[in-house]
Amino acid sequence: MKRPRGAGLLDCLGLCGALLVAWAAFPAAASAHGIVGRTDLPIPEWLFAWAAAFALIASFVALAILWPRPRLQQHATHRMFTFPAWIEPLAGAVGVALFVLVVYSGVVGAQVPTANLAPTFVFALFWVGFPVASVLFGDVFRPLNPWRALARAIGWALHRISGGRARPLLRYPEWLGVWPAVATLIGFAWLELVYVDRDYPRTLVLIACAYGGFQLIAMATFGVERWTERADGFSVYFRLMSRLSIVEVQDRTVCRRPPLSGLPGLELLPGTVALLCTIIGTTTFDGASNGVLWINTAPSLIEFFNHLGFSVTVASELAGSVGLAVCVLAIVSFYWLGIWGIRSVSDQFEVEDLARRFAHTLAPIAFAYILAHYFSLLVYQGQAVVYLISDPLGNGANYLGTSGFQIDYAIVTATVIWYVQVVALITGHVSGLTLAHDRALSIYRNPREAVRSQYWMLVIMVGFTCLGLWLLSAVAV
């Protein structure tokens, strides 16, 4: 069907005007509190907010006019090189060795979070570094995954001894989808953001060992690859982020693909929408927990639970649990509200179907939130690995000669961090808008309906951008 010239353009401009009016109220709130350690910015914070609004609206108008047919639903990959078969077992051995080192450091080393390798490795390199590496280089965690490597090694050994091939004991339930991964991410977020003793090295690595042991049992029960792809929360999470990469690995062949083209093929399993909303929601709480709103609210919640008979520590954890749950549910509700709006444009699809079809558009936003919120942590705390790897136990050793290294806090300025955060948010939301527009063109028979359906997606993107900028600027000093 030929697309009518300027289809929906007047309605589009009208909606954009309304969004600008609504946005006008935002900059004042965003600039009420500064970023911790922020120096004077070269331009006012409110100007960043207006620039973000115009970028989204301009992108929406440009897509409506210049993107008349889907381009990302199918893509061609270009082969770059093939790596030898021994690379993956070697990478698995490296992953197991790193896991053992971290566990040993946490159990035997000094129980001082800043002197022990375990907390920095888990919270900075693993939790933040792997999503960034996955976007840059593809699914790098898959070959390094220590639990998958151990399970594969055990299966290989049993095959050599018995001469038979190990088979899963049970079939993985299709209805379960990626819900175990959702539970894992919520659990880790609770550990990182709510649990009072999260930085205590021995406690941290004992939890890691318990998780690893459970993974091995589950892989033996349901199959190594099936469990890894569906239920191991970290594997699912990092693999999802790798779909944003232009690098793709196909049977030991490294290929290059167009930007964003890896996301439309995301398998829509039960729990996929919840998984993406969980990533955004937990990062939202991480940002909000440093803001004035939570600082003013948390004491009342703690007092409430304390009056119910809980200790101050448990009351604090319960209050944090409530805040975490509220943030995740708020993101879920906002997304479903936008999907209901899309459904009002045409009755071709049910709400649940639309929610799944547009779920992949949240992935760039999830990464934008991660990069914007954790960039400074990765840049600064990531440097600590240089001296911690030389003295992993915190006992004064200097195995690699780098224990005297100190974190260089001048490596990037607060202004550069602010630019990176804002650019990440704008790029992520424009990417989400592009994916949504491309998907709408592929599923709606009428191009005009496809464009009109994206009015609501624009509202979602503007809303998430508002939230992201507010979280960055409303940090208590």
Image (cartoon, helix red, strand yellow):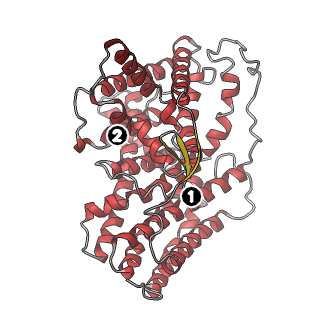
Quadrant location of the N terminus in the rendered image: bottom left
- Decide: is 219 above or below 465: above
Res. 224 visible in picture = yes
Q: Residues within 10 Å of mark 1 (few under 14, many from 20)?
A: many
Estimate the x, y position of residue 236 in percent, counting from the top left: 41, 41
Q: Amino acid at mark 1?
A: Leu
Identified at 70% across, 12% down, the residue is 397
Residue 425, numbered label: 1
- The alpha-carbon separation of the residues under discs 2 and 1 comes to 28 Å
Does dot 1 land on a helix, a strand or a loop? Answer: helix
Q: Residues within 10 Å of mark 2 (few under 14, many from 20)?
A: many
Q: Horizontal placement of 380 versus 411: left or right?
A: left
Identified at 58% across, 13% down, the residue is 109
Camera-side residue of 449 and 317: 449
Camera-side residue of 168 and 131: 168
Q: Horizontal placement of 353 versus 395: left or right?
A: left
Does dot 2 land on a helix, a strand or a loop? Answer: helix
| Residue at the far front in the pictured view | 163
